[in-house]
Amino acid sequence: MYRYKKETTIRINPETKTKLDEFRQYKNESYDELVRKLIVVAKTCEKEPKLSQKTIQEIKEARERIKKASSTQKKKLRRF
């Protein structure tokens, strides 16, 4: 998990928060981790639009594998 020297608060619509929650891969995933992942996806889509569809599919498949993983496996994945 990340350690921050300085944190900030942002205001978002409750509907946006609900949609962000749907992207969480595990219960305690921070919003910072989630936003960082979304930024990577967005940058990939901008730089390589053809690759973006493949990347999105790979992310979906990885999320499915994580959902099916045991709790021990999920703990190991959080380290990455």
Image (cartoon, rainbow, N blue to C red):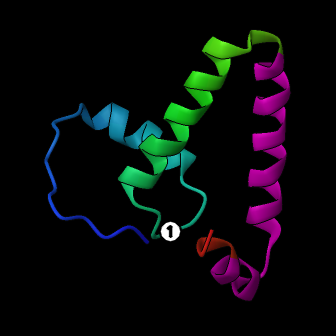
Label 1 environment density (alpha carbons within 10 Å; few <14, some 14–19, many ≥20): few
Residue that appears at 80% across and 73% down: 69
In this rendering, position of residue 5 left or right of residue 73: left
Q: In the shown orientation, is residue 5 left or right of residue 64?
A: left
Q: Residue at x 34, y 41 (%)?
A: 17
Q: Is residue 44 above or below residue 26?
A: above
Q: Which quadrant of the structure image shows residue 10?
A: top left
Residue 46 in the image: state x and y as whole percent.
61, 13
Judge whether residue 70 is colored magenta: yes
Measured from the top left, where is residue 3 in percent x and y? 31, 70
Kindly identify the residue that appears in the image at 73 percent across and 15 percent down: 48
Asked which quadrant contains residue 59, the reply is top right
Which one is nearer the viewer's eye here, 48 or 9? 48
Is residue 67 shown left or right of residue 41? right
State which quarter of the image contains the N terminus: bottom left
Tell me: residue 74, above or below residue 15: below
Question: For this rendering, which residue is in front, 21 or 40?
Answer: 40
- Asked whether 44 falls inside the magenta stretch, the response is no
Q: Identify the magenta region.
A: 51-76
Give the main secondary structure of the magenta stretch. helix
**Residue 29 vs residue 80, the one in the foreground:** 80
The residue that appears at 57% across and 34% down in the rendered structure is: 40
Amino acid type at image mark 1: Lys
Q: Secondary structure at mark 1?
A: loop
Can you give x and y, in whole percent of width and height, for residue 30 in the image?
A: 40, 60
Reply above or below: 22 against 71: above
| Left or right: 71 in relation to 10 | right
Q: Quadrant of the C terminus?
A: bottom right
From the image, tell me which residue sits under label 1: 27
